[in-house]
Amino acid sequence: MTIVLSRTANIAGSVIVVDHVRGLALDARIDAIKGLEVGLDITASHNLAGLVPARLSRARDIWKRS
Protein backbone atom coordinates (compact mmCIF):
# COMPACT_ATOMS: atom_id res chain seq x y z
CA MET A 1 0.00 0.00 0.00
CA THR A 2 1.23 3.49 -0.78
CA ILE A 3 -0.06 6.57 1.02
CA VAL A 4 0.70 10.22 0.38
CA LEU A 5 1.22 12.48 3.38
CA SER A 6 0.06 16.09 3.34
CA ARG A 7 3.29 17.22 5.03
CA THR A 8 6.64 15.76 5.89
CA ALA A 9 6.79 13.60 8.99
CA ASN A 10 9.52 11.69 10.73
CA ILE A 11 8.00 8.22 10.92
CA ALA A 12 9.71 4.86 11.20
CA GLY A 13 8.95 1.30 12.22
CA SER A 14 5.30 0.35 12.22
CA VAL A 15 2.04 2.29 12.10
CA ILE A 16 -1.70 1.67 12.34
CA VAL A 17 -3.76 2.94 9.40
CA VAL A 18 -7.52 3.46 9.92
CA ASP A 19 -9.71 2.64 6.90
CA HIS A 20 -12.82 4.75 7.63
CA VAL A 21 -14.93 3.30 4.81
CA ARG A 22 -14.41 -0.38 5.63
CA GLY A 23 -14.08 0.10 9.41
CA LEU A 24 -10.68 -1.56 9.61
CA ALA A 25 -7.45 -0.90 11.44
CA LEU A 26 -4.46 -2.03 9.40
CA ASP A 27 -1.17 -2.93 11.06
CA ALA A 28 1.54 -1.83 8.66
CA ARG A 29 5.31 -1.84 8.54
CA ILE A 30 7.00 1.07 6.78
CA ASP A 31 8.67 -0.30 3.69
CA ALA A 32 10.02 2.81 1.95
CA ILE A 33 9.78 6.59 2.16
CA LYS A 34 10.16 8.71 -0.97
CA GLY A 35 9.33 12.37 -0.44
CA LEU A 36 5.73 12.55 0.75
CA GLU A 37 4.95 8.99 -0.39
CA VAL A 38 5.23 6.21 2.15
CA GLY A 39 5.19 2.56 1.11
CA LEU A 40 3.57 0.25 3.64
CA ASP A 41 3.58 -3.51 4.02
CA ILE A 42 0.24 -4.56 5.59
CA THR A 43 0.79 -7.26 8.22
CA ALA A 44 -2.73 -7.62 9.74
CA SER A 45 -6.20 -6.08 9.68
CA HIS A 46 -8.71 -5.73 12.51
CA ASN A 47 -12.44 -5.01 12.37
CA LEU A 48 -13.23 -1.95 14.48
CA ALA A 49 -16.97 -2.63 14.78
CA GLY A 50 -16.60 -5.16 17.61
CA LEU A 51 -14.28 -5.60 20.53
CA VAL A 52 -10.70 -4.56 19.90
CA PRO A 53 -7.45 -5.03 21.82
CA ALA A 54 -6.37 -2.14 24.05
CA ARG A 55 -3.63 -1.10 21.61
CA LEU A 56 -6.31 -0.40 18.98
CA SER A 57 -8.64 1.62 21.22
CA ARG A 58 -7.35 4.93 19.81
CA ALA A 59 -7.93 3.69 16.25
CA ARG A 60 -11.48 2.67 17.17
CA ASP A 61 -12.15 6.10 18.71
CA ILE A 62 -10.91 7.78 15.52
CA TRP A 63 -13.14 5.54 13.39
CA LYS A 64 -16.23 6.18 15.55
CA ARG A 65 -15.76 9.97 15.30
CA SER A 66 -15.67 9.95 11.50
Image: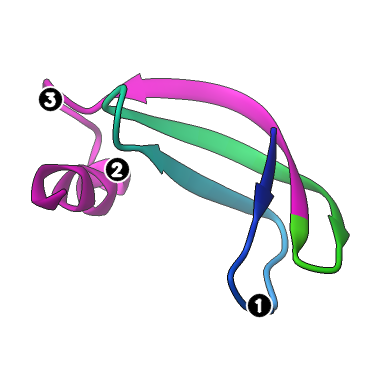
Badge 1: how crowded within 10 Å, few (<14), some, or many (20+)? few
Viewer-nearest of discs 2 and 1: 1
Residue tagged by mark 2? Answer: 56
Q: Residue at x 20, y 30 (%)?
A: 52
Q: Residue at x 30, y 36 (%)?
A: 20
Residue tagged by mark 1? Answer: 9
Q: Within the image, what quadrant is residue 11 found in?
A: bottom right
SS assignment at label 1: loop
Q: Which three-letter amino acid code belongs to the residue tagged 3?
A: Leu
Residue tagged by mark 3? Answer: 51
Rendered position, 63 above or below 24? below
Q: Which three-letter amino acid code belongs to the residue tagged 2?
A: Leu
Cα distance in 3D space between marks 2 and 1? 22 Å
Going by the image, does 63 lie left or right of 39? left
Which residue is more in the foreground, 6 or 47? Answer: 6
Going from the N terminus, do you reach mark 2 or mark 1 first?
1
